[in-house]
Amino acid sequence: MLVGCGGSQSSNKTFKHYVYVENIFGKELYTSGYTEFSRVYYHAGTDKFEDLERLRAEIFQNCKNEWKNKTFLGFSNLDEGCSAVKEDDERIYSSKKYKDLVAKISSEKIRQDEATKQSKRDEELKIKREKIARVELVYSSKCKKFKQGTPEYENCLFENEKLAFEEQKRLANLPPSERYAYTCEKTYGFRKGTDNFKECVFKIMTTEYEMQNQLNQRRIAELERKVASNQANTAYQNEMLEIERMKAKAMQDQVNFARNKDVTDTLLGISNNLLNPPRRPAPNAPQMFNCQTRKFGGFDQIQCF
C-alpha cells in the first residue's frame, strides 16, 4: 500500500503530502457485498515531509484499533489485514488467513445463493399447494379417475378451471336472455320449457337487475352527500353531472330489464312450444261439438257450436 508521496501544489508553493492505509481483509469483505465493513481506507495529509512517518504510524494504528475486535465467520484479529506499504500487501495476500477468508466468503456466497433459490422454490410450492387446494374444492369430482397428488390429477384440476374460466368469458358476451337460459339449463339442470326453468330464469334476471339498481342508488346517494357538503365550491358541478348520468343509467337499466323480460318470455314461449307442441286432431277424425235443442215456433231446433 502507498505511504507518503507528494500531493497538489498549494498557493505558497509547498506540497501536500498524504498517507494511505487500507485493511485488505475489509476490502475483500466489502467488495463481496458485506457493506457493514465499509470502513476500509484510512488517509491523512500534511504540508511537512518530515511528519510523514509519524502520520503513517498514526493512521496505521487507527486501522488496527478499528479492526482488532471485529470478527466474521469465525475469523478474528482482522487488524492483521491493515497494510501501509507494498511489502504489507504481499505478506497479507500470501497468508493462509487471507486465503481461508476468501474461500469462506466464496462458500458463504454459494450457500446464501442456494438458500435464496430454495426459499423461492418453497414459496412457489406453497402458492401451488394453496391453488390446488382451492381448485380441488370445485373440480375434484371431475378428476376422480386420477390418483390424488399425481401430476395427472393436478393437470386435470387446472384444465377444468381453465375451461370454466373460458366458459365464463363466453357467457359474459352472450345477450342477457341467452345467458340466463344457459345458466339455468347447464348449471342448475332445469329442462327448457319447464316451470322450474322459467322460474330460474326470472329469478336470475330479477336478482341481477336489483343488484345493479342498488349499486346505482348507493352511488347516487354518495354523490348527493358530496354535493351537499360542497355547495360553496364550483367543483361540485362535476358530481351533479355524474348524478344525472347515474339517474339516466338507472332509468335505462329499468327499460333494459323490461325489454329483457319480454325477450326472455318470448324465447321461453318458443322453447315451450317446440318442446310441447299443442295437440291437433288427426286428419278425418270426428270433431266434437257442444249441441243444444231450442224451441223455434212449433219446431225443435238443434244448434251446435
Image (cartoon, helix red, strand yellow):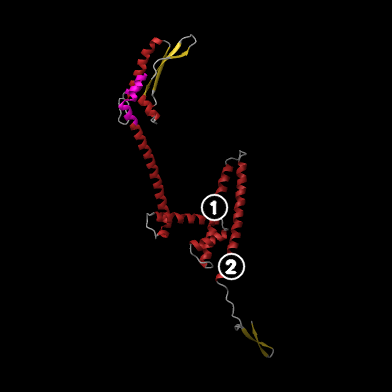
- The image quadrant where one finds the N terminus is top left
Vertical position of residue 239 compared to residue 74: above or below: below
Instruction: List x then y, in percent, for residue 240.
Output: 61, 45
Vertical position of residue 170 compared to residue 103: above or below: below
- Residue 207 in view, yes or no: yes
Q: What stretch is highlighted in magenta?
A: 80-102
> For the residue marked with disc 1, what is the amino acid?
Gln
Q: Do the residues labelled 2 and 1 touch (CB within 8 Å)?
A: no
At a point 35% along the width and 19% down the height, the residue shown is: 87
Q: Nearer the viewer, residue 279 or 59?
A: 59
At a point 42% along the width and 52% down the height, the residue shown is: 134
| Closer to viewer: mark 2 or mark 1 | 2
Instruction: List x then y, in percent, for residue 44.
Output: 41, 16
Q: In the drawing, what numbered circle is on residue 132? A: none
Left or right, 27 with respect to 305, comes to left
**Residue at the farthest bottom position:** 298
Vertical position of residue 65 compared to residue 217: above or below: above
Q: Which of 253 and 116 is in front in this view?
A: 116
- Can you identify the residue that label 1 sits on? 214
Instruction: List x then y, in percent, for residue 33.
Output: 40, 31
Quarter of the image for residue 144 reads bottom left
Q: What distance separates the C-alpha of mark 2 from that of mark 1?
A: 32 Å
> For the residue marked with disc 2, what is the amino acid?
Ile
